[in-house]
Image (spheres, rainbow, N blue to C red):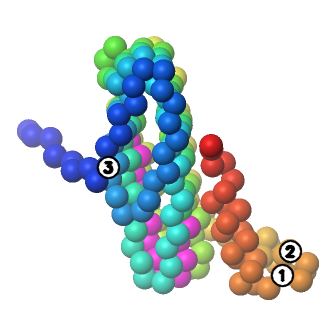
Amino acid sequence: MSKKLKIYNLKFIIKKGKKRVINLSAGKKYLVRLTERGAEVMINCKIKAKEKEAVSVDCDVVHEAARTKAIICLKGVARDAARIKISGKVMVNKGAIKSEDLLEERLLLIGNTAGGEAEPVLEIEEDEVNIKHAASIGQVDDWQIFYLGTRGISMKSAVKLLMESFLDNGQRE
């Protein structure tokens, strides 16, 4: 059985002792390789989709050496009939002991027809690692909109405020 070949739009190689922050854009496939001991990366992505848009982001991180570290935060907000798919994959190769990773995928849906898919994947070939992941898909709380309305904020402004707050909360720099 052959593996499906994945074609990436952008590739990053992080080397020994280097720290890097990468901000991702929707509609692309990314590969980040941590190739030498002590390499670190923080990956952020904020996606917005409205009407009937369908957007996605795909990010693979490969720990190839010992004591590498990655923090991956992928977030999206879908409105109306929009759909968002976020895929994060963490691979820890044999020999990448004491590697650390946090893969977080969060989607916020606004409206009854908005949809989303969060797909975290972990492939770990080493025992002595600290790898975590989280994924959630939720809707805007009507009580939050009501509360903001009682403070004189229009429904449209309240939804925008909640969207921006959701996207900014937890982003790392």
> Callout 2, which amino acid?
Tyr
Report the residue at 76% width, 77% height from top. Answer: 158
Left or right relative to 171: residue 53: left
Q: Residue furthest left?
A: 1
Magenta stretch: dominant SS? strand
Q: Which of marks 3 and 2 is nearer the N terminus?
A: 3
Q: Nearer the viewer, mark 1 or mark 2?
A: 1
In this view, 154 is above or below 21: below
- Sequence order check, earlier mark of 3 and 1: 3
Classify the position of the N terminus by image quarter: top left
Q: Where is residue 92 in the image (x, y as percent from the top left)?
A: 37, 26
Q: Which mark is residue 105?
A: none
Tell me which residue sits at (54%, 59%) in the image: 46
How dense is the environment of label 3, judged by Cα within 10 Å: few (below 14), some, or many (20 and up)? few
Disc 1 or 2, which lies upstream in sequence? Answer: 2
Q: Which residue does the numbered mark 1 point to in the structure image? A: 153
Residue hosting label 2: 147
Label 2: element kind: helix
Q: Mark 1 belongs to which amino acid?
A: Ile
For label 3, the SS is strand
Can see residue 168? yes
Left or right relative to 12: residue 131: right
Query: Residue 10, labelled with which disc?
Result: 3
Taking depth in this image into account, of 19 and 89 the one nearest to the observer is 19
The residues tagged by marks 3 and 1 sit, at their Cα atoms, a distance apart of 41 Å
Residue 12 sits above or below residue 165 on the image: above
Question: Spatial distance from mark 3 to mark 2, Cα to Cα?
Answer: 43 Å
Q: Does 139 sit above or below residue 94?
A: below
Question: Nearer the observer, disc 3 or disc 1?
Answer: 3
Residue numbers of the magenta segment: 77-89
